[in-house]
Image (cartoon, helix red, strand yellow):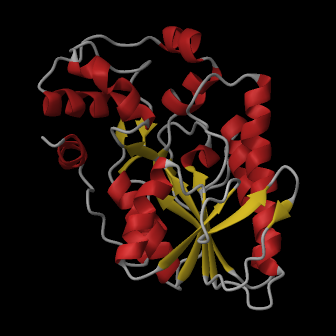
Amino acid sequence: MNVLISGATGFLGGTLIPELEAGGHRVTRLTRSPKSADDLGWDPEAGTIDDLEGTDAVVHLAGESIAEGRWTPGKKRRILESRRKGTRLLSEAIAALSAPPSVMVSASAVGYYGDRGNELLTEESGPGSGFLAEVCRDWEAAAEPAREAGIRVVHPRVGIVLSTKGGALGATLPIFKLGLGGKVGSGRQYWSWVTLDDVVGAFVHALTNESVSGPVNVGSPNPLTNAEYTKVLGRVLNRPTIFPVPAPAARIVLGEVADELLLASQRMQPARLQETGYAFRHPDLEDALRHVLGR
């Protein structure tokens, strides 16, 4: 297929593109700054986008970073508006094509569910409350023009991605390597973790499997509490994990980000992936961490 990808320079896009190309697909990047003949341009703020004719499939990853920096009012506005405007512009553009693509895989996140304690969350679970839940609801809704045009739309609700390049693991790894890590807050909150390999695998599965549509939980079938996660990470690194980070301290350092990304509990189950035959490469946390960390 000719696959159009927005947000291609992010750490997910940078890993997904080689996987698609290795599978024989041609990748076209949708970018604000086209640098080659294989790039197409767009500007969500201005509402402009190049002609996308000839696109067979779309992967939409673009949006203001959620994990980088404190959530000032301006930052929150950029997070929300970049997803609303970008997704709607792209979905309207492909819906208007004479030969629309067959599928649009438009990213979402586990934040859709808000803070839900021990509740087991499947794709049938309703949205939660909070800023990220609002963002994810609007993000998914903005793809409606593509759905109405008969395009198969998939929303991968991605959990906490284990990668040394960023996210919760990348940010805290130096502290844990020094033996100064520990649980965050009570440690009872569930973390729906997933390796980058399985995120890429899930996206490829969504692109190529016609039975996959709508929301898709992308997290290991074995989510763990933060305390359990911390214990396993310490064992893999052979370091103690006896220095907890109290919730008030996390809030002082990170503000609202702490409540929604580190302290919120989301026990997500990847029901739709499993129902449609996706086999996780790393369903067990210790195996996953040893793979990611080369241990």
Residue at point 73%, 22% (across, down): 72
Residue 293 image-quadrant placement: top left
163 left or right, relative to 232: right
Residue 213 screen position, x and y as percent: 59, 76
Residue at point 39%, 66% (across, down): 18
Residue at point 84%, 49% (across, down): 45
Work out whether 208 lies above or below 269.
below
161 left or right, relative to 41: left
Work out whether 295 lies above or below 106.
above
Please tell me which residue lies in front, 165 or 262. 165
Total marks shown come to 0
Residue at point 67%, 48% (across, down): 63
Work out whether 116 lies above or below 141.
above
Please tell me which residue lies in front, 277 or 54. 54
Residue 181 screen position, x and y as percent: 29, 17
Taking the image as drawn, is residue 228 in sight? yes
Please tell me which residue lies in front, 279 or 116. 279
